[in-house]
Amino acid sequence: MTIRIKHHPVAAFAIAVWDYFILLPDEVALIWPSRWTVSKCLFFMNRYSVFIDPFMLIYVLMIGRDEHSCSINVQIQAYLRFFGAKICQLILIWRTYAVWGCKLDKAVIILSFLYLGMNGPEFWAAHKYITGLQLVIIPGVPGCVVVSTNRWVWWPIMQLMIVESVLIILLAFRAFQHVRIGRTSLISVMYYDGLLYYICIQVSLIANLVVVLVTTIALKSFLLCLQRVLQSVLCTRIMLHIRRVHKNKADGLQRGETLTTMEFNQISSSSYLNDM
């Protein structure tokens, strides 16, 4: 069982590499020529940081032979995984903020304070979980075995589920408002991509929560690396899809095509979609 568990970060890393080369032409065409903005910085942070922590975990589980070195590496990669998940959250929050017209109304301010207020307990729980990780070396077996001595990671998982649910509700409400006035391709892309992302992430989060709370010590961190890669891959696809639709709309304007007032406002008012 131990030998099999060691290979799960290899599968996660392979997914990240495969997705990178699949989407590289879109990245070169849609992201690289654009001016530097918040969304572009978030894109690159999300896109390239996903290779670091799975690779570090592969080293710990399959190559490392010193407990102290493995302990340092596994804690660093765990913190990187935590902050990588926060980057994905910021991307989704930025998208929701753009959909709502980049307005700092009361609802957005209240939600921002709630989100910031939840980050403190989330970081504390993540820190408790990470500092409770122990490394064991089994004679004759390459690499170190990571043992989770507590289940505090359940709270960051729950917090992520709550934030994702709030964001999809806000996105769905805004999409419903636009459908009542007139359907636009930009809003449709945001809504359907957001809904697909929400379903995939919630399923993986529920699976992670069950594993953390129910399974044995050796299996508690089994799906966390895959969760991290899945979030990054889906966020990348969401951003590129929005850029592609936005570019098509902008090209249509240059060719003299007529857009609805809603479509034009969506392009001109949103700093997130106007990077091109």
Image (tube, helix red, strand yellow):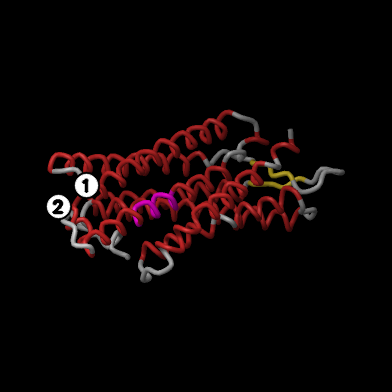
Residue 28's x, y, as percent? 46, 63
Instruction: Answer left or right for 179 relative to 14.
Output: left
Instruction: Answer left or right for 167 relative to 268.
Output: right
Q: Main structural element of the magenta stretch: helix, strand or loop?
A: helix
Q: Residue at x 67, y 57 (%)?
A: 73
Label 2's element? loop
Label 1 or label 2, whichever comes before in sequence order? 1
The amino acid pointed to by label 1 is: Thr
Label 1's element? loop
Q: Which residue is mark 1?
A: 184
Residue 268's disc is: none
Q: Nearer the viewer, residue 120 or 8?
A: 8
Q: Nearer the viewer, residue 70 or 149?
A: 70
In the picture, which quadrant includes the N terminus? top right
Q: Residue at x 40, y 51 (%)?
A: 89
Instruction: Answer left or right for 11 relative to 261.
Output: right
Residue 260's disc is: 2
Q: CA distance from mark 1 to mark 2?
A: 8 Å
Q: Nearer the viewer, residue 49 or 162?
A: 49
Q: Which residues are magenta?
A: 235-243
In the picture, which quadrant includes the C terminus? bottom left
Q: Nearer the viewer, residue 144 or 173?
A: 173
Residue 97's x, y, as percent? 27, 54
In magenta stretch: residue 236: yes
In magenta stretch: residue 151: no
Q: Residues within 10 Å of mark 2 (few under 14, many from 20)?
A: few
Q: Residue at x 21, y 49 (%)?
A: 107
The amino acid pointed to by label 2 is: Thr
Q: Quadrant of residue 7?
A: top right
Residue 214's x, y, as percent? 57, 28
Residue 174's x, y, as percent? 21, 44
Q: Residue at x 53, y 41 (%)?
A: 152
